[in-house]
Each structure stands twice: as C-alpha cells, then as structure tokens.
Amino acid sequence: MLIPHARDTVHRAWLLRLLSAIADDRDLTEHLRFKGGTCAALRGLLDRFSVDLDFDLLTKEGTPLVRRSLERIFSAIGLTIKDQSAVVPQYFVRYDSPKGHRNTIAVDITVPPSAANTYEVVRFPDIDRFIPCHTIPTMVAHKLVTPLDRFALHGSVAGRDIYDIHHFLFNGFPWNEAVIRERTGYSLAVFFRTLHDFIEKRVTQTIVDQDLNTLVTSEEFQRMRTRLKQETLSLIRAASE
C-alpha cells in the first residue's frame, strides 16, 4: 500500500496489525469477507493510501459472534472503541498517536452483502496471510456504484471514489454486471449514463483537492487533480459503448 506521507506509517502499521489479528481468527475468517479500498491497495490493485477496513458479513446470524471476536481483538492489541453502531458490527477504534496525526480506524461491515458478490482467497504479502475477499470484478462493480450510494445516503461526494473509478477503468479491470444491476436496479447502459451525469454535475475541483491530497503523493496529486474528472467521464463513456 502506498504511504504518501511519513506520518501515515503509524496508521498503516495499525491497519496491518488489526488485519493480521482478524485473519488469524477462525470465526472471523469464516464469517467475514475483506473488501474496499484497503483490500484493493494491499492487493496492489490501487495506488493510493487507504485508512479503513471494510468487510462483508455473510449472514446476519453471525453478528453476535463477529462482535465478540472483534471486541476481544481490539482489547488484545491495544485499540480503544471510540464509537460503534448498535445496528451492525461497525466500529471506530482509536490508537495513541501524536496530536494532529491520524488515530482512528473505521471497521465497517455490510450485512447482508449483495447476493451477486463473488469471493476468492488471496494471499496478502504485507501480513503473510491468506484472506477471503472480493474478486476483482465484484470490487470494481461496488466502487462504480459507490458515488451514487454515498450521495443518496449521506449527501456527500468523495474525490477518492472518482480516483478509484478512474484507476480501475484506465487499467481495464472488469466489473461484475450482476452487482451493478442488483444494487441500482438499472441496466448497464442506464447505470453508466447515470454515473456519468452524476460525476459531471456533482464533482468539483474542491472535492477532488480536499479528498485526494492526503491519500496520494504530492507528485501524483499535482499530476491528476485537474485531469481526473474529465478523464473519468471519458472512461465511463468508453465503458458504456
């Protein structure tokens, strides 16, 4: 995973410490499937820093067991629960760090996951562990839908979503069409048109600048900041053809 700034080394170390502990827990690896930006970055599929851990929980019935296991791990490795959801196993856990530095990891769990998801077991060299996680097409499909979902749920737009979409499409990664249909109810043609119009209307230079400048190197930020939106729109138009 890319570390754009020296201060991010500590956060990455805590991410890997927590992920290693999760991977070593048999109950968690049976019930959880790794996904999201950190998963993609650690697989070498994404060239930016990622700060949280995201998982699918295969069945709602596994929720109590997953909660107990995660909370036991947090305590064992020295993480403090800062906040949590009463509905799903979602946590914000804190570690000690110098003032002004990152000190919180979000552990976000989706239950139930999309029925169209596909999974595979992958070795993560940074922690020398095998972890079940999203396949590349499933990962890409969810990222394509994320900007629309994020805005519908929170009224916000994240520049990192656009950066990730650009990276995946630019590198020719495939997507799981069934996931897109399931999550949006759209045909592929309607979905890409909707996504294109959303980015064209909602993504501003300020959004790109504020979200990306801490997640990529200064050189990459300057190289991509002004071209990201238009190149992404072009890639989406090409994908829809």
Image (tube, rainbow, N blue to C red):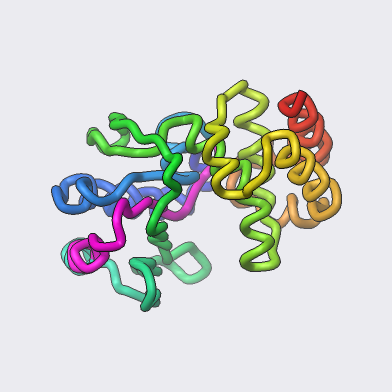
Q: Where is residue 170 in the image (x, y as percent from the top left)?
A: 67, 25
In the displayed structure, 119 sits above or below 157; it is above
Residue 154, image quadrant: bottom right
Could you tell me if residue 238 is visible in this image? yes
User: Image point 49% across, 63% down: which residue?
Assistant: 101
In the displayed structure, 14 sits above or below 135; it is below
Q: How many labels does the image show?
A: 0
Is 57 covered by the magenta stretch?
Answer: yes
User: Image point 77% across, 45% down: which residue?
Assistant: 194
218, 41: nearer the viewer: 41
- 149 left or right, relative to 50: right
User: Image point 74% across, 44% down: which residue?
Assistant: 195
127, 162: nearer the viewer: 162
Q: Where is residue 86 in the image (x, y as percent from the top left)?
A: 36, 78
187, 58: nearer the viewer: 187
- Outermost residue on the left side: it is 26
Q: Where is residue 142 in the image (x, y as percent from the top left)?
A: 54, 43
User: Image point 79% across, 40% down: which residue?
Assistant: 193
In the displayed structure, 140 sits above or below 115; it is above
- 125 left or right, relative to 169: left
Image quarter (top left, top right, bottom left or bottom right) of the C terminus: top right
Could you tell me if residue 47 is visible in this image? no
79, 217: nearer the viewer: 79
Residue 231, image quadrant: top right
Q: What stretch is highlighted in magenta?
A: 48-70
Is 90 covered by the magenta stretch?
Answer: no
Q: Position of residue 62 (x, y in %)?
A: 23, 60
